[in-house]
Structure formats: structure tokens, C-alpha cells
Image (cartoon, helix red, strand yellow):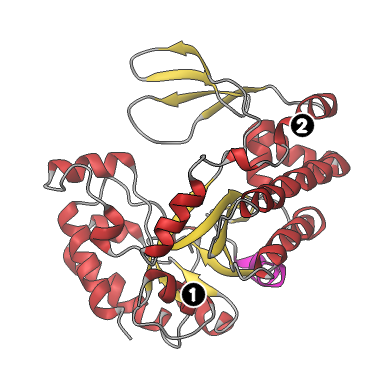
């Protein structure tokens, strides 16, 4: 099977030749692995048989980037979302938010036209790139930040949560405008001939202990926008994958009802257990991830136990895509990772 055939089968709860595979790597991890023998410029998808090709677009208000301060380790930058933040120069990690250009309803009225949908939010050659990927048998997804994740990028994280509690009408309008951009930009690029196989929404709306806001608030403020977006794509034969870190257990049924077909990354350290989820969601939700990346930083015995104890159960009857439960960190050696991939390839066949 090609990746496109395989993923399409999995997303319809069929039985493919093997489980799907996807992965995200820290830049520091690649640097470490190159020191351990990974060829520079290696195609990781080809090397490890990864199945999903992501095609993101620029959702920002497209403010001019500007470096405001800089030292040996960090820099303070106003980014294309209008957010001033401090970030590491030579390693990954969360940025420190300092200030935002959009703070008030008047600011939103002033700048919201910068969020309007348009095909030029994609690279000029996106249609050609998608066709080239299709010819290779790739499974290409329309990747975007869902309304909450998009909104906090320009409003601020804490500020967005406060608005949800104190000014629900305003945040609902902002979420609606974000939704219009997501759908409208797809329409614009599709009119040029772009063809996608699925859609993948990125939205971290939970932390280690549970959702960032109550399930009631999710249902009142965010779920209607999720349902509109996901239904739109599902109805066009582009099933919905959803990325959400943290413990989403309280929202699983809401996600399914909103139209989520696959849930990623099932973060183990936040209390997500795909073996408990499997019988509850079989045939309704594809499990995507759920492998504790911390075990890959230990010995081969722990690596093998993690894979053999989980993947055979998760893949039974279809509906599973491999991924670690977060990005592969630089604590994982190349030797351990390659051992893990050999085991996954062994046990992940149907």
C-alpha cells in the first residue's frame, strides 16, 4: 500500500497492510543523531516510513517580524502575530510572552482584516507540491491551528482564557473569524486546484490534569466552531485529525461528536491511556500516538516493553497510527530510536 492508501484505510477504520506512522522531532534531537551517525539532510519520512505530509499555511496577521533585543542565548522578537516574546536562539522550548499588539475589542476591529482568508497564505507552488506528493502516494493534510490555538497566538495565552470567562461574546466573534479564515483559505486554494486527503487541526486545550477550561465552556464557546470546521472538511472527504496535548479524557465524546476522526498524541504523562480508550472508541475514533517517549530514553528492554505491550492491542481491528506521545526529545539516542522503529515495523504488520 502507498501512504495515501494506508492512511485512507485507517481513517475509515479498515485494515491496512500495517499501522500508519508519523513523528515530530526536536531540532536538538536531529543535531544529536547527526553526531551519532545520521546523515545530514536525511529524509526522515523515507528513512522511517512516515505516512503523513503536512501542508500548513500562514494564519498570522502578517505583521513584520522585528528583533527588539538580543544576547548570546536569547532574543526578544515581535513576531508575525504581533506578539512580543523572548525565545531561545539555539534550542527549542516555549517562548515567554511579553506583550501583544491586539489587546482590546478596538484592536481586533482595527486588525481583523489581516486575518481574512486568501490563497496567498500558502506558498505559490502549493498546487504543484501537492500533485507531486500525490504521485508519490503521499497522504497530504491541510494543517492549521484551530480557533483557540490561533487566537492565543495574537491575544496571549492567559488573556484568551480570561476573555472566554469575562467576554464570551467577543471571544466567540474572534473564534468565528478564525473559523472563517480556516475554511475560506481552503476554499481559495482548492479553487486553484489544490487537493488534500485530510485536515489536521492543532489545538492544545488541555494540560496535565485536564482541560484548560470546563467541558461546559468548551461546549458553549469552542465546540460549535470545531463542529463547523470539522464537518465542512469531513463532508468533502477530508477526515479530521486533531492534535491536542494534555489530558483530554473529559472531552473525548465531544471531540467525536464534533467530527474528530483521529486524536493525537494521547500524552501518557498527562494521563492518557490508549489501551483503556481502545474498547470505548473502537470504530469511532482512530488512536494516534500513545507511546511514552520517555521510555525511549531508557534501555532497550524498556523500549521493547513499551512497544510490545501497547501496539498489538491498539492496532487490533484497525484504527491506530503510531507516534510517540510528544515530539522525540534529544534524550533519545539514535540507537534506541532505530531499535524502536525496527520493533514497530515488526509488530505493526497486519
Does the segment drawn in magenta span residue 255?
A: yes
Of the 4 image quadrants, the one containing the C terminus is bottom left
Tell me the element at label 2.
helix
Q: Which residues are magenta?
A: 249-258
- The residue lying toward the viewer, choosing from 335 and 211, is 335
Q: Main secondary structure of the magenta part?
A: helix
Does the segment drawn in magenta span residue 153?
A: no
Does residue 302 show up? no
> What label sits on residue 113 in the rendered view?
2
> What label sits on residue 46 in the rendered view?
none
At which x and y percent is residue 307?
A: 30, 72
At which x and y percent is residue 320?
A: 44, 75
From the viewer's perspective, tell me whether residue 48 is left or right of residue 266: left
Q: Which residue is tagged 1? A: 8
Q: Is 139 placed above or below 211 here?
A: below
Residue drawn at the location 25% of the way across and 44% of the way down: 30
From the viewer's perspective, tell me whether residue 255 is left or right of residue 245: right
Does residue 7 show up? yes
Residue drawn at the location 15% of the way across and 46% of the way down: 39
Tell me the element at label 1.
helix
Amino acid at each position: 500500500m502507498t501512504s495515501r492508501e494506508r492512511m485512507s484505510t485507517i481513517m475509515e477504520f479498515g485494515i491496512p497492510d500495517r499501522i500508519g506512522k508519523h513523528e515530530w522531532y526536536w531540532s536538538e534531537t536531529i543535531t544529536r543523531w547527526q553526531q551519532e551517525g545520521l546523515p545530514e539532510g536525511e529524509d526522515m519520512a523515507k528513512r522511517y516510513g512516515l505516512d503523513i505530509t503536512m501542508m500548513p499555511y500562514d494564519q498570522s496577521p502578517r505583521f513584520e517580524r522585528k528583533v527588539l533585543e538580543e544576547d548570546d542565548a536569547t532574543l526578544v522578537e515581535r513576531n508575525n502575530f504581533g506578539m512580543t516574546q523572548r525565545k531561545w536562539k539555539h534550542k527549542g522550548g516555549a517562548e515567554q510572552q511579553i506583550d501583544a499588539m491586539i489587546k482590546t475589542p478596538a484592536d481586533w476591529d482595527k486588525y481583523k482584516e489581516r486575518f481574512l482568508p486568501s490563497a496567498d497564505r500558502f506558498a505559490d507552488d502549493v498546487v504543484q507540491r501537492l500533485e507531486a506528493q500525490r504521485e508519490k502516494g503521499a497522504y497530504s493534510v491541510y494543517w492549521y491551528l484551530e480557533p483557540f490555538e490561533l487566537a492565543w497566538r495574537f491575544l496571549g495565552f492567559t488573556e484568551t482564557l480570561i476573555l472566554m470567562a469575562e467576554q464570551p461574546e467577543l471571544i466567540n466573534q474572534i473564534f468565528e473569524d478564525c473559523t472563517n479564515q480556516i475554511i475560506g483559505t481552503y476554499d481559495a486554494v482548492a479553487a486553484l486546484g489544490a487537493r488534500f486527503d485530510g485536515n489536521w487541526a492543532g489545538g492544545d486545550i488541555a494540560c496535565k490534569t485536564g482541560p484548560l477550561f470546563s467541558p461546559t465552556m468548551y461546549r458553549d464557546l469552542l465546540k460549535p466552531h470545531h463542529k463547523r470546521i470539522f464537518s465542512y472538511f469531513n463532508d468533502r472527504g477530508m477526515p479530521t485529525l486533531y492534535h491536542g496535548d494534555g489530558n483530554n479524557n473529559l472531552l473525548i465524546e465531544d471531540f467525536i461528536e464534533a467530527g474528530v476522526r483521529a486524536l493525537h498524541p494521547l500524552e501518557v504523562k498527562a494521563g492518557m491511556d490508549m489501551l483503556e480508550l481502545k474498547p470505548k472508541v473502537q470504530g469511532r475514533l482512530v488512536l494516534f500516538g500513545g507511546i511514552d517517549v520517555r521510555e525511549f530514553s531508557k534501555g532497550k528492554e524498556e523500549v521493547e516493553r513499551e512497544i510490545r505491550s501497547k501496539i498489538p492491542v491498539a492496532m487490533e481491528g484497525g484504527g491506530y497510527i503510531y507516534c510517540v506521545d510528544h515530539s522525540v526529545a534529544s534524550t533519545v539516542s539514535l540507537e534506541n530510536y532505530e531499535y524502536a522503529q525496527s520493533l514497530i515495523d515488526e509488530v505493526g504488520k497486519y
